[in-house]
Amino acid sequence: MKILVDADACPGKSIIEKVARENNVEVIMYCDINHVLNSNYSTIKYVDGGFQSVDMVLINKVESGDIVISQDYGVAAMALGKKAYAINPKGYIYDDNNMDQLLFERHISSKIRRSGGKTFSPKKRTKRDDERLEKNLLKLIYRCKDN
């Protein structure tokens, strides 16, 4: 088991590393060459700056039983398809029960934006988001270790 992070603009990296370090889990952060990441714990992997390049490299590296952290529903859906676990940086766990609805909502929002409409912006990150990320990431790590 390892944790793979879609690290371009990913909040909560310090929480991810703290939980991983405490549980002796490898973390690999993927970002494009336009970002600079530093870590004393994680392995940083840089990829080309093309459209969805980070997403594609990360998904090609994920294996069954890994944990993927991403804000992108498409990445999460592909991770679930590879029998990995997926969670977003606010600590919400993606699973087969909620993925169809999330992808449908993304599709509808995209149609609205293409037609010139506006959709809601994400809410500002809160302390509660940090707490949820820590709690649910730990839950996924334990689930992986039990399997």
Image (spheres, rainbow, N blue to C red):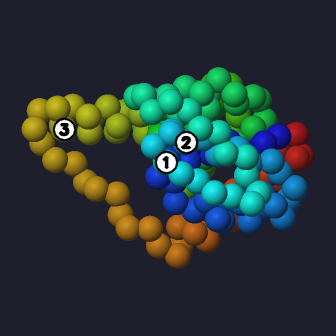
Q: Which amino acid does label 2 sit on?
A: Cys
Give the quadrant of the C terminus.
Answer: top right
Q: In this view, does 130 lie to the left or right of 126?
A: right
Of the numbered discs 3 and 1, the one sitting upstream in the chain is 1
Give the Cα separation between the discs numbered 3 and 2. 26 Å
Give the labeled residue for mark 3. 113
Give the labeled residue for mark 1. 35
Give the labeled residue for mark 2. 31
* Foreground disc of the pair 1, 2: 1
Mark 1–mark 2 CB contact (< 8 Å): yes
Q: Is residue 136 visible?
A: no
Q: What residue type is labelled 1?
A: His
Q: Which percent across, then down, holds residue 144?
A: 82, 44
The residue depicted at 69 percent of the width and 58 percent of the height is 39
Mark 3–mark 1 CB contact (< 8 Å): no
* Foreground disc of the pair 3, 1: 1
* Foreground disc of the pair 3, 2: 2
